Amino acid sequence: MLLSNLLSTKSIAGTFASAGEIIWILQTAAFLEVVHGAVGILPSGVWLPFMQWCGRTLFFLVTACEIVQVQDHPSLFITFLAWCLIEVIRYPFYALNTIGACPHWLTYLRYTMFIPLYPIGVLGEMLLLNQAFPYMKEKNIFANFFAGLPFSYYNVVQVVFVMYPFAWIKLYSHMLKQRGSKLGKRQEKKKK
């Protein structure tokens, strides 16, 4: 949808209109990865998938869906493209690993393509959040929920925005360690 819109219109302006609904469904369903980590279906654990899910949910379900003014921003296209490319690799990797039939080339892609795509996705997320700040403040999103508190949703997102790079570094470092572990095992097997 994302690429077909780009190719047919020669523009990224329709990014949200063309892919927003399916990404909403997929991002909501992505919480299953947290559940799967909790019950042991995936070896990922709970905390890191939960952090990633929260970041993407903040970005997409709350920011991009609620603030129409940023839905055609180039950073949304950049983020969606990075997310889609990495997920097209990640989920087949999980599925094939679950049944013990994952080819090495897919393992290599899983633990290599995140190196450029993860920073691109996070950069897109942060750029869009930055673009959304004035609209968040003006629209006063979730005002009823925060009515009795001394801060607003806008304030919460500002704090999260400052913490975002630190959380990203933790996730990225974890992925780099996993890469060494997963691809290093393959190299050791070849030597034997």
Image (cartoon, rainbow, N blue to C red):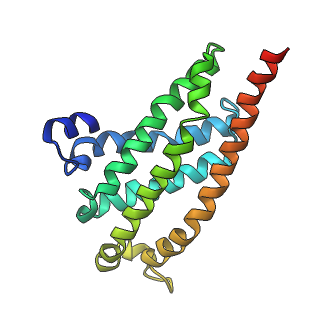
Where does the image place residue 12, in percent across and percent down from the top left? Answer: 23, 48
The residue lying toward the viewer, choosing from 151 and 3, is 3
Most foreground residue, 25 or 100: 100
Q: Quadrant of the C terminus?
A: top right
Residue 3 quadrant: top left
List the single residue furthest toward the front.
Answer: 191
* Front residue (pair 43, 152): 43
- Does residue 142 appear to the left or right of 6 in the view shown? right
Residue 164 appears in the rendering: yes
Instruction: Residue at 29% x, 55% y: name it.
Output: 74
Please tell me whether residue 52 is drawn above or below residue 112 in the rendered image: below
132 displayed left or right of 149 = left
Residue at the spot 30% in from the left edge and 74% down from the top edge: 135
**Is 157 placed left or right of 192 in the picture?**
left
Quadrant occupied by the N terminus: top left
> Residue at left 63%, top 21%?
97
Q: Position of residue 81 (x, y in %)?
A: 37, 42
Q: Residue furthest right?
A: 192
Give the percent coordinates (x, y) of residue 6: 22, 40
**Residue 154 in the image: above or below residue 86:** below
Q: Residue at x 34, y 56 (%)?
A: 75
Residue 20: % across, % down = 29, 46
Q: Which of the 4 image quarters holds residue 39?
A: top right
The outermost residue toward the left is 9
